Image (tube, helix red, strand yellow):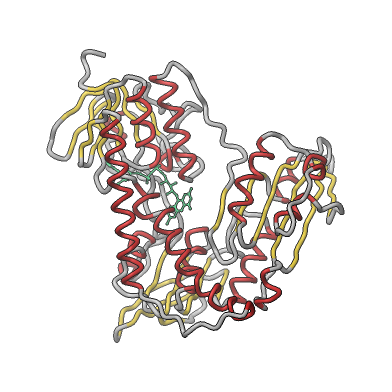
Amino acid sequence: MADFDVDLFVIGGGSGGVRAARIASQHGARVMLAEEYRMGGTCVIRGCIPKKLLVYASRFRGEFEDAAGYGWTLAQPSFDWPTLIANKDKEIARLEAAYTSTLQKAGVDIAKSRATLADPHTVVLGDGRRVRAAHILIATGGVPGYGDKIPGIEHAISSNEAFHLPQMPRRVLIQGGGYIAIEFAGIFSGLGAQVTLVYRGENILRGFDDDVRHHVRTDMEKHGIKVITSCKVTAIEHAAGHLSAHLTGGNHIQADCVMFAVGRPPNVDNLGLQQAGVAIGKNGGIAVDEYSRSSVASIYAVGDVTNRVNLTPVAIREGHAFADTVFGGKPTAVNHTNVPTAVFSDPEVGAVGLTEAQARSHCLHTDIYKAMFRPLKATLSGRDTTVLLKLVVDGVSGRVVGCHVVGEGAAEMIQLAAVAIKMGATKADFDATIALHPTSAEELVTMRTKSASYTRAAAE
Ligand SMILES: Cc1cc2nc3c(=O)[nH]c(=O)nc-3n(C[C@H](O)[C@H](O)[C@H](O)COP(=O)(O)OP(=O)(O)OC[C@H]3O[C@@H](n4cnc5c(N)ncnc54)[C@H](O)[C@@H]3O)c2cc1C
């Protein structure tokens, strides 16, 4: 590889790029990485981490309310958005510095610059410098989408801007029904805003189990979030210090902030993909094989830019597998099945494996076990909420093929349930596990009666 300036050039310092660069360097490769914005990428700077900090902030409202039933008397709590944002920014800056220093310690050469492809082995930096690389990894992530171009769309923000609003908006309209829209609805509502969620589909959280979707929507509405489905924002006007969002059907809603969270297309524009001959797949992302290799032998892609499973731990796993494959002498393909996922909404969702609908089309027999109950904590607090636990079982093998939880601690529960499901645990294994009492999770190992059973028709 002597003809090249580096063995690996990584474009993008997010979850996938950073992991790939560090591991490749540890395998002995000469690595350079370009990041055009801030080291750490979406997850650290304007995704998972700042989002979860805002979620924590928003949940104090419920805790304060619940405290009364447990004998606490509190002075009227008040909330200060600038304090939250300043503290969040301080933590994000600390993490960004930690990412930079980890890469530097690993020997990675960092360019604070945009990078584009000129050909299968050449990257051009913002200052015009050309770097020749034996291998190139594209890890440029995704970008917030805005859907159809509608009049006044320039007045809408995406999740990127939501983390930096100078003031807490009092009335928020969110268009979208995916996890980012639902999470921000919970954040703004918990922090005291009046929130309306507008979604074009029939129900929110497409892709999740139907019981989960119904349960979350019902609870969100109980908590005061207005959910309008089968509807879209058609125009946004700015007048007299507020925004007015026009909806299909002729209604309009006034708001201080209109946020669009309608998907994140892969970040493939103006990267020089065509010059290098890199093909785009049907899903709009860079087309790759199971080892994340693109249509060009020297160019690989990982993370959201490939639009496979757009989650941080997946991007990290793909980046690591790429480095092991190309520089570690250990070809590693990433298995994208049974990836656990969460929605940090109010109530929280955790899910892994097949939904009931997916199982019914995949499995010859499907058994469903379901429990819905008032959590113990809600008894004294008087909170009007229920927990949902659901197991989807392949009736032939007895394996648990899906687990879905809605309620406090759902994400933490699902991380562990995912281990069992990944190992191929059967319903009998769950039953053989002694419950941990008193918890909500114990119902996962005590459900004995099927709530439904289906056999796929022969023709299906
Ligand atoms: C609001 C929000 C909440 C989220 N919450 C979660 C969550 O709770 N859990 C979870 O698992 N996932 C979550 N995600 C998704 C997660 O952030 C992404 O899946 C993950 O960051 C993808 O990593 P990546 O390496 O593919 O890309 P990214 O992390 O997006 O990194 C790409 C990097 O490339 C840089 N870049 C782009 N083009 C160039 C170029 N030409 N030159 C140089 N640099 C470039 C960008 O500036 C960016 O830093 C969330 C996302 C958002 C937006």
| 2 displayed left or right of 183 | left
- Which residue sits at x=36%, y=38%? 139
Q: Nearer the viewer, residue 79 or 207?
A: 79
Can residue 460 be spotted in the picture? no
Up-down: is 272 above or below 27? below
Q: Nearer the viewer, residue 270 or 255?
A: 255
- Which residue sits at x=71%, y=68%? 376
Residue 230: x and y, percent?
57, 69
Quadrant assignment, res 382 = bottom right
Counting every numbered tag in the picture gives: 0
Up-down: is 459 above or below 87? above
Quarter of the image with the N terminus is top left
Residue 404: x and y, percent?
67, 53
- Which residue sits at x=38%, y=80%? 244
Up-down: is 403 above or below 251? above
Quarter of the image with the C terminus is top right
| 94 displayed left or right of 327 | left
- Which residue sits at x=28%, y=53%? 93
Residue 320: x and y, percent?
43, 30
Up-down: is 212 above or below 351? below
Q: Which residue occupies the extreme top position in the image?
A: 2
Can residue 36 be spotted in the picture? yes
Residue 147: x and y, percent?
42, 59
